[in-house]
Amino acid sequence: MFRDLPALQKIIRQLQKVPYLASKNVYRVALYFLQEKNSDIELLFDSILDAKKVIKNCSTCFNLTENNNTCSICSQNIRDKSVICVVETWYDLNAIERAGGFNGVYHVLGGALCPLEGISADDLNIESLFKRIDNNVSEIIFATNSTPEGEATASYISSKVEQLNLNVKISRLASGVPIGSSLEYMDRVTIYKALSGRRPF
């Protein structure tokens, strides 16, 4: 298919590298780009390049921030910095923020432990989490996804935190979060109830 259109094949090969883009939509997206005005396509790609230049990770929690070392959440004085909610990705953090009701701060791990894919503790923002935990931290909430990888990650971090011998409460999101699901795709009520009714880890 499209063997006589090598330029289109090149676009499709690049689009196939984009995660979350269903394979059946790759051709539609490619044709969309071809049919759009050159000015609109240039505006799209310029905005992506500009975003890559200014958006980076927060130096404290690894949330996304633009042009600042500290994200908007860590910078808020009204936030309870003694409560740290540990999430896998920015998508999970965003899901909890959309649900509302949480006034603590976050720590974005950047993924979950997965030995089969070669993802170890050194590949995640775990060591920086330990550096944040001191006598001023009263609680750590694990909001990792309810997957084998998410559970293993929470267990690993929990065991390390306990070795610090600090008086830190360790909790986990309550039931109501379906097993094998991701926070990114849950509704706000489910996330809010799970966070409000969290239980000891």
Image (cartoon, rainbow, N blue to C red):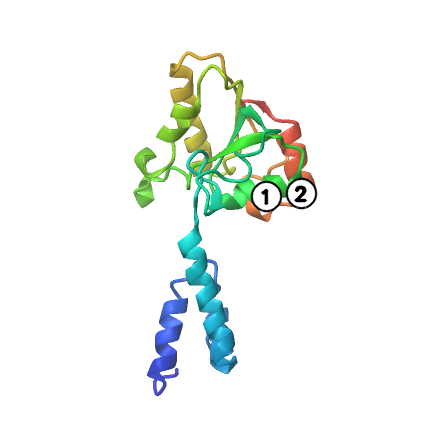
Residue 24 visible? The answer is no
Q: Amino acid at mark 1?
A: Ala
Please tell me which residue lies in front, 35 or 78. 78
Q: Residue furthest front?
A: 67
Q: Residue furthest right?
A: 189
Where is residue 24? Give x, y as percent.
Answer: 49, 70
Q: Residues within 10 Å of mark 2 (few under 14, many from 20)?
A: some
Q: Nearer the viewer, residue 3 or 93?
A: 93
The numbered disc on residue 50 is none
Instruction: Locate residue 97 relative to residue 51 in the image: left or right.
Output: right
Specify whether residue 67 is in view.
Answer: yes
> How many marks overall?
2
Q: Is residue 52 above or below residue 34?
A: above
Q: Quadrant of the N terminus?
A: bottom left
Give the class, few, some or many, for how many residues have Cα within 10 Å of label 1's Cα (few <14, many ≥20).
some
Q: Position of residue 30 (x, y in %)?
A: 46, 75
Q: Measured from the top left, where is residue 123 in percent x and y?
A: 32, 39
Residue at the (66%, 45%) spot, across then down: 187
Among numbered discs 2 and 1, the one appearing first in the sequence: 1
Residue occupying image coordinates x 39% and y 80% = 8
In space, the residues marked 2 and 1 are separated at their CA atoms by: 7 Å
Is there CB contact under 8 Å for labels 2 and 1?
A: no
Kind of element beneath mark 1: helix
In the picture, the disc for residue 188 is: 2
Give the residue furthest to the bottom.
4
Looking at the rendered structure, the kind of residue marked 2 is Arg
Residue assigned mark 1: 95
